[in-house]
Image (cartoon, rainbow, N blue to C red):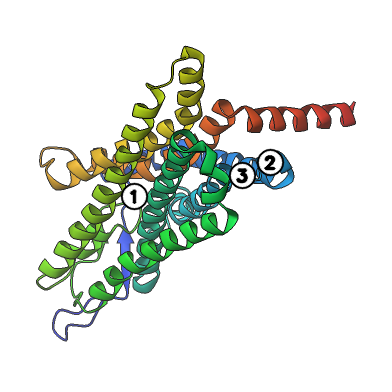
Amino acid sequence: MVNNTTHHYISYFYLVGIPGLEKFHSLISIPVCLLFVLTLLGNSIVIATIKVEPSLHQPMYFFLGMLGMNDIFLTCSTSLKMLDIFWFNEHWIEFDVCLTQMYFIHMFCAFESAILVAMAFDRFVAICIPLHYSTILTTTMVIKLGVVGLSRAVLIVFPCPLLIKRLPYYTSYIIPHAYCEHMAVVKLASANTLINRAYGISAAFAVTILDIWLIATSYIKILQAVFRLSSQNARSKALGTCAAHICTILAFYTPALFSFLTHRIGKNVSPSVHIILASLYLLVPPTVNPLVYGVKTKQIRDRVLSLFSHLKTTEG
């Protein structure tokens, strides 16, 4: 596979899984599989509920549907290969397949961030300028926001695999990771990777800082509008409509922050801790999102409960 004399390019990478915990891969696969199944089930229920319930055909729930679809794709991009490693010891992955997985994982993460910004904008319009909500957030506007967010994600991540393709890979082929992560792949190159590292960090910072700033700005305006309300009940109701979105934001950005910090500056953090954190960042938010919205959003909760009660009645 690797010939140092003729400098043949490697054609496969070897994904270790969780470094140092290889003996426990079969046990680790249980929570991974559980999170995978819960993600598919939870998001499918939310998407189906939004589709069949006319009262949920509103911008906020259209964005939630986008989030659910993106979470399903993100989980599939990550979990299937992880389970392949944990269950069947299928550690090898083709070079181009690895780059494809890397591209889709990072692209879906960038799109997820864009959807959270769109949802923050939705709450801003609903609370700060409610009389113009229906004229601003039309179905066309929702589609445009989705297309813009997806286009940004596609374009900003696209250079990553292209820049990797220009690098020579002669000797190193072992990736100490459970999936193909950008920096983990770049580090194996047999050449200077300054451009790859600079672009990867710049793209991550650009997306994250911009989106967090937009979300924070929206919520500052929301809080200003809420505290101007005279009624305590009105304040609670307004903040209640934001609770699920805030939980989703925390579930997405908090593990991402810890993963980023341990990877860049956590020199004393063991590889297994870093890989576990990085994996949780991709596996937990897609599982949590439908649970949060199912519990916090009355329309979705009531609709799901009514569907289950109808099924029980039919069976009875």
Q: Is residue 2 above or below residue 208?
A: below
3D distance between C-alphas at marks 1 and 3: 42 Å
For label 1, the SS is loop
Identify the residue under disc 3.
58
* Picture quarter with the N terminus: bottom left
Identify the residue under disc 1.
17
Q: Which residue is situated farthest in the bottom direction here?
A: 6
For label 3, the SS is loop
List x then y, in percent, for residue 205: 21, 53
3D distance between C-alphas at marks 2 and 1: 36 Å
Q: How many marks?
A: 3
| Mark 1 Cα shell of 10 Å, populated few (<14), some (14-19), many (≥20) | many
Residue at position x 25%, y 42% in the image: 259
Residue at position x 28%, y 71% in the image: 159
Quarter location, residue 207: bottom left
Residue at position x 44%, y 49% in the image: 115
For label 2, the SS is helix
Quarter location, residue 272: top left
Report the amino acid beneath label 1.
Gly
Report the amino acid beneath label 2.
Thr
Residue 36 circle label:
none
List x then y, in percent, for residue 195: 14, 69
Lower sequence index among marks 2 and 3: 2
Nearest the eye: 217 or 261:
217
| Mark 2 Cα shell of 10 Å, populated few (<14), some (14-19), many (≥20) | many
Report the amino acid beneath label 3.
Gln
